[in-house]
Amino acid sequence: MVLIRVDNLEKYYSNSGLLAVKNLHFTIERGEFVSIVGPFGCGKTSILNLIGGITDNYKGSIRINNESPSEARKKRKIGYCFQKPNLLPWLNVLDNVLLPQKIANIREDNGKAIELLKMVGLRDCQSMKPYNLSGGMQQLVSITRSLILDPEILLLDEPLSSIDEINRSKMQLKLLEIHKRTKKTTVMITHSINEAVFLSDKIIVLTPRPAKVKKIVNITFLQRNERTFFSKKFINYLKIIKKELKNGQNN
Amino acid sequence: MDKIIKTLFTLSTFFLIWYLTVTLLRIPSYIFPNPAEVFGAMYENSLTIYSNSLITLKEAFLGFLIANLISVSIALGIAFNKNIENTIMPFAITLKTIPIIALTPLLVVWFGPGEYSKTATAALICFFPSLVNVLRGVKSLDRDLVVFFKAYSLSKIQLIKMLIIPSILPYLFAALKISSSLAIVGALVGEFIGTNKGLGFLIISNYYTLNTPYVFASIIASSLIGIIFYYAIHLVEKRIITWTVTID
């Protein structure tokens, strides 16, 4: 069942007037993990901000379960996790996780927050301040916070880009586990093709700016051991996406 | 304990050098009294100095409060409407360039010779440094955090309460610390004209009679209330702001 439908989307950058996105079409099914990859500056974050209802002023259509993105945002159907964890340094981990509930004037559900922190392995850190946590842990708190309002969609804007290689692999596993457990429709922007193939059900490859869909690659790993960086299938997907990105840049 | 001993040692050395210099050079008391004379004057007039210190402190505190409330309100306004900055800053800078001593007689005319004119002097002297600091805080707001809050449809009141006020607190405390000592200076300058109360009055009236030990005693008292005021703010800051990194 289609949850997000993007049709003929066109967006100009408000400050420079440059065309960021042109004639963009794609759909995302409920429960899917979708990654958007593309060259630097091709408008990936703009697309995510449009889907999230953070930016408007676009041509074409974006529908989230037959609602506009800003309607979906106002109904708290979207959870956000940005490149930076954006935790408030004066609040402890638990209060940071509860922040969206506080903003929404919903009774703060400590039990739920603790349950989510337990899921990401940070239950013992609930009373710590963000500066006592590593970058990866801070990003996990940020992901936990994006889940507290039980959104239908999770938007992740390069959530692992500032994390070192070793911790990044652990975080990818964590993200996969979170997706399996919560079944949230997830849209992630990433520069890492490995990461995209490892996590996604579908990868949208974009052309350089103005962004158009170059190819949509469906990822299916039938066996558990196929989802490894060394499996034939995995390497094959990498090749396809790299080729598409290269073709897009050459064009 | 070690710190207290070191401080006591430094202070004792200072007073000893002062005493020996004044005594050996035979400087008359009306030009530069020795520490014993100053503390003698302080002891003899302790009640008067105490009651007048409270008056100066009250005027300084009220002026400090008014100046900081106004500067925080303006800075919050600027956070939502940049035009306010263009309107207000030229006036604020002009006000800053006028020496406070030149405005004091006018303030007495406008607010009367009582405490109001002294409070106004203290407020005027505190206003600009406070505004500049708090404004710096508002301008240093983390853009990514603003976008995050926007994503969760935060109202303006929530934005002020949950993001802007906590974010500008380190800057606000810097402003409060600077203006705490300035407020005392403002109140003292205000008391130089048209009043018979406060430490400023004690300084100026004893200066006219060349009672220099009393002048020194009043200056030390004003310095002490300035230090107490500053450290009171410092203590509150340490309790509230626990998330900034300090280099030990």
Image (cartoon, coloured by chain):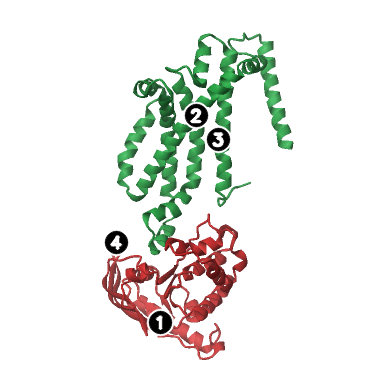
Chain colours: A red, B green
Q: Which residue is mark 3?
A: B230
Marks 1 and 4 sit apart, C-alpha to C-alpha, by 31 Å
Q: Which residue is mark 2?
A: B58
| Crowdedness near tag 4: few (<14), some (14–19) or many (≥20) residues, C-alpha within 10 Å | few
- Whichever of callouts 3 and 2 sits on the residue coming sooner in the sequence is 2
Nearest to viewer (mark 4 / mark 3):
3
Three-letter amino acid code at the position of disc 2 = Lys
Residue B24, quarter of the rendered image: top right
Task: Please state the chain letter of the residue tagged with numbered disc 4 in the rendered image.
Answer: A
Marks 4 and 3 sit apart, C-alpha to C-alpha, by 47 Å
x 70%, y 24%: residue: B13
From the top left corner, tell me how far across and down residue A98 is, in percent. Answer: 50, 64
Q: Are marks 4 and 3 on the same chain?
A: no
- Whichever of callouts 1 and 4 sits on the residue coming sooner in the sequence is 4
The disc label shown at residue A14, or none: 4
Nearest to viewer (mark 1 / mark 4):
1
Q: Which residue is most to the left?
A: A59
The disc label shown at residue A30, or none: 1
Nearest to viewer (mark 4 / mark 2):
2
x 33%, y 43%: residue: B85
| Camera-nearest residue between A138 and B59 | B59
Tag 1, which secondary structure?
loop
Three-letter amino acid code at the position of disc 3 = Tyr
